[in-house]
Image: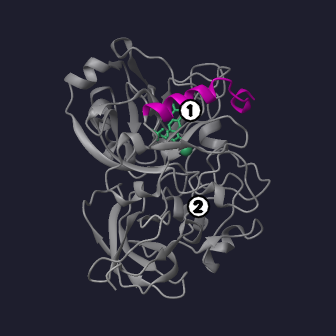
């Protein structure tokens, strides 16, 4: 299948992005050498709420398309009619801003043992930006949406990136989510959307895994079913990214395509509502950003060291964040603080009072439904049963992993020079 071939231009594209981002990101090992992937270069990215564009990871499968915004339109199909140009989007509709923690569904894939292939992300494929653009609801209501038929219907977004063959990058989200808080984004942190992030316009789905946030948006369709093969009026494969890739499944299993799901929440799906879950909203997760473990730390005058990081739970709220400084033996509650937006991470801090020595630090978050990050990723055999054992299910594609142990760090505390 065309979507599986290696891509010649990939390395040039990666180098150009690293240069443009001034070293805020670094290349990531990709087993099959197929993706353009760069991740946060430093752990310190996870000590700030807003991620600068320079430190925001990038992930896509095809070359970045060369697009003239003046000539670009988003076609509207299925139940919808017409098209919108970039000028329409920017001048005829309200502009809103949404905060969104983008996390690749493959974040943590590199922590699976045995390895699962593909891009070996650690915790580097997560970032929070403020995205500006037009509410999806404004566009849809203006172009033929039947507002009485929203439940159990889907919005499919098609990317304008070209694969080697005719295959398309298409993703479907429930229409309810699309109308609730999604936007067609043309700005990122107050700047025009950069080419690597989807210029001139992308779908932005607050709190949902990166893959749902279709870049270089070319078409939107409202239909009764999520995208299946042959569903779009065009050649090539249509459903690979929705129905095959990005589904959580045990070793050696090919998931069956389906038209709809019993439960949307990714964790509900994983707990049993759906055989081979779709990666929709991000699962509960946290990363310590400071200290970074790179160099020893010296306590402040009052003897404390601040541990600071970020915690998120997709479009659900983070309820609790705990920190361990003894490799998981004991835990203390840390404080959540700072900006609080649906779909974006929270900052946390913990004032730690250590004596000089070597320490292993972990953080673990719990969401508003009481779902807590598991300790580590299971063996391949365990599948869903792993959840009862404080393990995240090892899965073939390495998706949605949120175990806390692999994201911990070791740090040396030195004695205060004045002591
Ligand atoms: N058209 C298109 N959109 C895409 C992709 C792609 O390959 N093509 N990659 C997706 C994936 S897998 C991720 S994780 C996010 C990453 O968004 P970013 O590069 O802006 O961080 O874009 C998503 N949108
Ligand atoms: Mo991704």
Question: Which of these two is toward me, 261 or 192?
Answer: 192
Q: Secondary structure at mark 1?
A: helix
Front: mark 2 or 1? 1
Tell me which label, 2 or 1, sits earlier in the chain. 1
For residue 340, side relative to residue 406 (left or right): left
Q: Say which residue appears at 66% left-offset and 69% top-offset.
A: 384
Spot the residue most to the top. 71
- Could you tell me if residue 276 is visible in this image? no
Asked whether 10 falls inside the magenta stretch, the response is: yes
User: What's the mark number on residue 14?
Assistant: 1
For residue 80, side relative to residue 61 (left or right): left
Quadrant in which the C terminus appears: bottom left
User: What's the mark number on residue 220?
Assistant: none
For residue 15, side relative to residue 383 (left or right): left
Give the image quarter of residue 374. bottom right
Residue designated by label 2 = 401
Question: Which of these two is toward me, 383 or 403?
Answer: 403
Q: Say which residue appears at 45% left-offset and 65% top-offset.
A: 286
Q: Say which residue appears at 56% left-offset and 53% top-offset.
A: 107
Segment tinted magenta in the rendering: 1-20
- Could you tell me if residue 271 is visible in this image? yes
Asked whether 3 falls inside the magenta stretch, the response is: yes
Q: Is residue 382 above or below residue 419?
A: above
């Amino acid at each position: 299948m065309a979507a599986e071939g290696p891509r010649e231009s990939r390395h040039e594209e990666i180098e150009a992005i690293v240069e443009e981002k001034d070293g805020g990101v670094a290349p990531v090992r990709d087993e099959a050498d197929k993706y353009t992937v760069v991740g946060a270069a430093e752990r310190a990215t996870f000590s700030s709420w807003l991620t600068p564009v320079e430190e925001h990871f990038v992930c896509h499968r095809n070359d970045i398309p060369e697009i003239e915004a003046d000539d670009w339109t988003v076609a509207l199909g299925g139940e919808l009619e017409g098209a919108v140009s970039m000028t329409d989007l920017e001048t005829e509709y309200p502009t809103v801003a949404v905060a969104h923690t983008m996390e690749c569904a493959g974040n943590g894939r590199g922590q699976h043992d045995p390895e699962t292939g593909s891009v070996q992300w650690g915790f580097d494929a997560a970032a929070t930006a403020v995205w500006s653009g037009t509410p999806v609801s404004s566009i849809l209501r203006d172009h033929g949406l039947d507002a009485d038929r929203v439940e159990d219907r889907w919005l499919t977004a098609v990317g304008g990136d070209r694969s080697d063959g005719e295959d398309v990058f298409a993703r479907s989200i429930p229409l309810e989510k699309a109308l609730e808080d999604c936007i067609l984004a043309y700005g990122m942190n107050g700047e025009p959307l950069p080419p690597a992030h989807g210029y001139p316009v992308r779908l932005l789905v607050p709190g949902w895994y990166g893959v749902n946030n279709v870049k270089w948006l070319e078409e939107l369709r409202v239909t009764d079913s999520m995208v299946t093969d042959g569903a779009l009026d065009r050649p090539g494969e249509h459903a690979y990214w929705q129905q095959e890739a990005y589904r959580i499944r045990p070793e050696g299993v090919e998931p069956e395509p389906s038209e709809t799901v019993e439960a949307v929440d990714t964790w509900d799906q994983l707990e049993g509502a759906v055989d081979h879950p779709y990666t929709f909203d991000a699962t509960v997760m946290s990363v310590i950003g400071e200290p970074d473990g790179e160099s020893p730390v010296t306590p402040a005058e009052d003897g404390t060291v601040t541990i600071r990081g970020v915690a998120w739970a997709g479009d659900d709220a983070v309820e609790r964040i705990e920190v361990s400084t003894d490799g998981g033996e004991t835990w203390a509650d840390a404080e959540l603080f700072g900006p609080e937006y649906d779909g974006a991470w929270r900052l946390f801090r913990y004032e730690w009072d250590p004596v000089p020595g070597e320490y292993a630090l972990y953080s673990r978050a719990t969401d508003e439904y009481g779902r807590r990050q598991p300790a580590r990723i299971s063996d391949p055999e365990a599948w869903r049963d792993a959840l009862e054992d404080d393990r995240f299910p090892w899965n073939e594609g390495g998706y949605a992993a949120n175990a806390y142990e692999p994201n911990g760090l070791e740090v040396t505390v030195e004695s205060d020079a004045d002591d």
